[in-house]
Image (cartoon, helix red, strand yellow):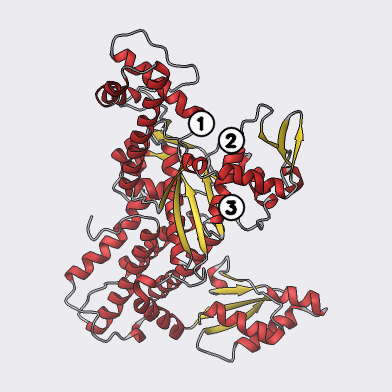
Amino acid sequence: MNAEEFLKQKIASAFGPEYKPVIEKPRDPSWGDLSTSIPFTIAKVEKRSPKDIANEIKVSTSKNQEYFDSITVAGNGFVNYTYSLPYLRNRLALILQQYNDYGSSTEGNHKKVQVEFVSANPTGPLNIVSARAAAVGDALVRLLKFRGYDAKSEFYINDSGNQVKLLGDSMLARVKELQGQPFQIPDQGYHGKYLIPLANDALQEVIPTVKNQTEEEQAQALGQWTVERMVALQKMVLETYRVNYDEWIRESSLYEQGGTETALKALDSTDATYHKDGARFLATSRFGDTEDRVIVTSDNRFTYFLPDIAYHKNKRDRGFQRVIDILGPDHQTFPKRMKAAMKALGYDDKFLDVIILQQVNLLRGGEVVKMSKRSGEMVTMEELLDEVGVDAARFFFCQRRTSSHLDFDIDLALKCTEDNPVYYVQYAHARIASIFRKSPYSLEDDVSFELLEKSEEKDLVKKLMEFPAMVALCVTTLETNPLTAYLQEVAATYHRFYHEHRVISDDPELSKMRLALCRATQIVLKNGLNLLGIDAPESM
């Protein structure tokens, strides 16, 4: 049991399980290591002085000296706690014992959770917003698994509808261009030059098989062929980015299985649909949306909303108890209407979470990069990875809250200095590995943790102790930025310790204790970087 759990148990035992004390780190380190303001809550209910309650809590939690050196009542009712040295030494030993499992938990109880992210249209290369979504989505899947959830990743391929027709028409135009024939790309088509090399391949692979067909049939064949090529390219780039999906599901498969019609019938059976002006509406405003939404048009066509509902019903039918969608900034209205649709189907409020990622700006020399040097068009995810590497890209994209715009400084990502946050964290891990390569001592021998007493040593243990709570926070908030910030703090705390104290000295017992402290730091850094999908290098 850790100190926070001990305090919660003691307070519940003394005042009742209905009280859920918040145990947090004090703003000022001089106040102690942990603090609670629960006396104020209890005092309101019991009509007593918060300070009296605080003193009672002090007495009830001071009977066990295993956790704390001192307990003080501050202000009008705060209770502050300072860790004992035996507790810090025990925590250090626990990190070494749990090793790769340190920070993990069974709290998820194998609950089936699906995280869908990127799901870019198969009509062009992945862009930098997709790169952000891939970094965040993959990290969340890793975090959820680490905390005991049965988490799966999924990419939804939008391979049906008008966009594929426009892609085929655009490809046919590019093929004609290569053949020296008159051509015109549709106004709403795909004008990017990235289609030209694909059109060149299509001249060899597709056109000979459809040359006797109508232009409409040629465009249809080109559209389907290009979708397959684009999906293959997207998979390749994502795998380079260390993102390997558990499932790739196609929109076309939902149509083939009658999923959209089944979803419509399910909605009709709930009396949540109605007809107006020849169209069929879903009464989403009854379930929290700003307005009702058309799901079948007056000429009997499904709107985009209905297949989306069918896809989410399909997720539920596959046994997922919770689904998390990570979408781009152009989906601002999606959360309310899709959550309303899920309620209309009878699903509970906790079934669907939607994360809307904000825009990404690439900066070079302090200026926004608007064009790719290679193509003169948008900067692709592949180009960014080629320039800054996977580790920097993933760390930088995970550094900000998903609701915040992100400025990606390319110059900073390329620096091999402590100014570059991912370099700074990785360097701490590599520095520790270097120490072990040079060490004449082995951690297989008995280590005397009793020698841990210096302030920098204690500060480092305290920082390492925060790791499980930081992982839990990321899972609770569905954010990755607390972990990137924490890893930088671990690196900084370690570097301070390293500069103040020699790890390897003529004192074997002290050396082994400090090597154990280094190993514990290495464990936390590696576990944290692994959760972000980032390498923990042995040398740099």
Q: Give the residue at the far front of this rendering.
A: 212
The residue positioned 27% from the left and 87% from the top of the image is 446
Q: Does residue 299 appear left or right of residue 27 in this picture?
A: right
For discs 2 and 3, the disc positioned in front in the rendered view: 2
Mark 1: few/some/many CA within 10 Å (<14, 14-19, 20+): few
Position of 48 relative to 429 (above/below): below
Position of 472 relative to 163 (above/below): below
Q: Position of residue 522 (x, y in %)?
A: 32, 67
Distance (Cα) linking label 3 and label 1: 26 Å
Position of 342 relative to 236 (above/below): below
The residue positioned 46% from the left and 83% from the top of the image is 87
Q: Position of residue 340 (x, y in %)?
A: 68, 47
Q: Are marks 1 and 2 in contact (CB under 8 Å)?
A: yes
Residue annotated with mark 2 = 304
Residue annotated with mark 3 = 353
Q: Nearer the viewer, residue 287 or 58?
A: 287
Can residue 485 be seen here? The reply is no
Which labelled disc corresponds to residue 161?
1
Mark 2: few/some/many CA within 10 Å (<14, 14-19, 20+): few
Distance (Cα) linking label 2 and label 3: 20 Å
Identified by mark 1, the residue type is Gly
